[in-house]
Amino acid sequence: MKALFIGGTGTISTAISRTILEQGWELYLLNRGSRNAIFSGKLTQIPCDINTDTDLEAKLKGLSFDVVADFIGFTPNQVERDFRLFNGRTRQYLWLSSASAYQKPLANYRVNEATPLANPYWEYSRNKIACEDVLMRTYREHGFPITIIRPSHTYDERNVPLGVHGKNGSWQVVKRMIEGKPVIIHGDGTSLWTMTHNSDFARAFVGLMGNIHAIGEAVQITSDETLTWNQVYTSIAQALGVELKAVHISSEFLSSCGAYNFFGGLIGDKANSVVFDNSKLKRLVPEFTAHVRFDQGIRRTLDHILAHPEYQKDDPEFDAWCDRVIAAREKALQELAASAR
């Protein structure tokens, strides 16, 4: 079996690339090649930046694939480009959408593929919805063999999944925990969320590759484990062997603080309680069960990050912002208490 991955070295796609190479697939990676050396197996590199390369047709000349998967498509013009490039060249085209595209606020906390797509809070999600519309139209009108995949919050050994962090990723929050400093949790920490380890995601994704029953379908891939955000942060602190000093601040307040654009990511996504119904995935891939419990997976992630300084990216700007927001909250509480005496 022969697959072409556009991207192929990200949080989600690295595990998929490794899995199919281990299974003996012939894999082509169409990307800039900065991380391709991490793989071994029958791998062919097609070096390019797909968003700027004007010679893609020549690079793909004479090639056809059982599967093409695009992991880095975010806008309608990008999936329209993929249709032009791969229509007639592949038996299946898989594209990564996002569970953030589901209706916000949710009419029902239980989410499946029939949940309406509508997110007025986050442009990222609206673009994903527009891409899905384009792809379903190519399927209906041209028979383009699409499968739409909707991941939620997926993590790997290089990143700690959190609700609130700065521009350099999650390390600064981890560092605050290690240093005994308070960390911000959005809301009261009791809203429900799902974390999925990329190795679990990969097994489900590979089960959909070459699966004729997945053609023309949208399928969400997540773990079945549901956690509160308090449990997420507690699991991280316990894995670090430190006490969690949580400060709960409303998502609306955090979204209005100005320095960081949390509006889409919180109000349009993580502030909402979601429980995923993966019945459709399990009908299509009957052998799939998520194996990695969050408290186990996050220990592996933290062990890896602590052993690799290159993933420990300090963010003093975000650190100072956290201190200011927490101090403002404490000052307001003190003033309210004083006025009540």
Image (cartoon, rainbow, N blue to C red):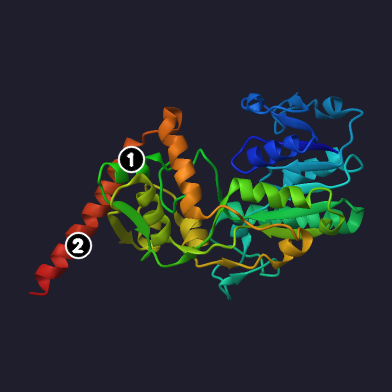
> Is 4 in front, or is 166?
4
On screen, residue 275 versus residue 8, left or right, reads left
Q: Is residue 53 visible?
A: yes
Number of numbered markers: 2
The mark found on residue 54 in the picture is none
Quarter occupied by residue 42: top right
Taking 92 as reference, is 45 above or below it?
above
Is the Cβ of the residue at disc 2 closer than 8 Å to that at disc 1?
A: no
Circle 2 is placed at which residue position? 332
Nearer to the camera, 197 or 334:
197
Q: Which residue is mark 1?
A: 175
Mark 1 Cα within 10 Å, few/some/many (few <14, many 20+)? Answer: some
Specify whether 62 is left or right of 304: right
Q: Amino acid at mark 1?
A: Lys
Residue 297 image position (x, y, % from top left) = 51, 48
Name the N-terminal-most of marks 2 and 1: 1
Q: Amino acid at mark 2?
A: Ala
Residue nearer the viewer, 104 or 194: 194
Q: List x then y, in percent, for residue 294.
A: 50, 54
- Viewer-nearest of discs 2 and 1: 1
Q: Count neighbours of disc 2 (C-alpha within 10 A) and say few if under 14, some if 14 to 19, many if 20 or more.
A: few
Q: Residue at x 40, y 57 (%)?
A: 255
**Residue depicted at x 13% and y 69%:** 337
Q: Secondary structure at mark 1?
A: helix
* Left or right: 2, with 45 as reference point: right
Q: Quadrant of the image for the C terminus? A: bottom left
Q: Position of residue 231 (x, y in %)?
A: 41, 60
- In the image, residue 180 lies at what x, y percent? 25, 46
Gap between marks 2 and 1 measured at Cα: 26 Å
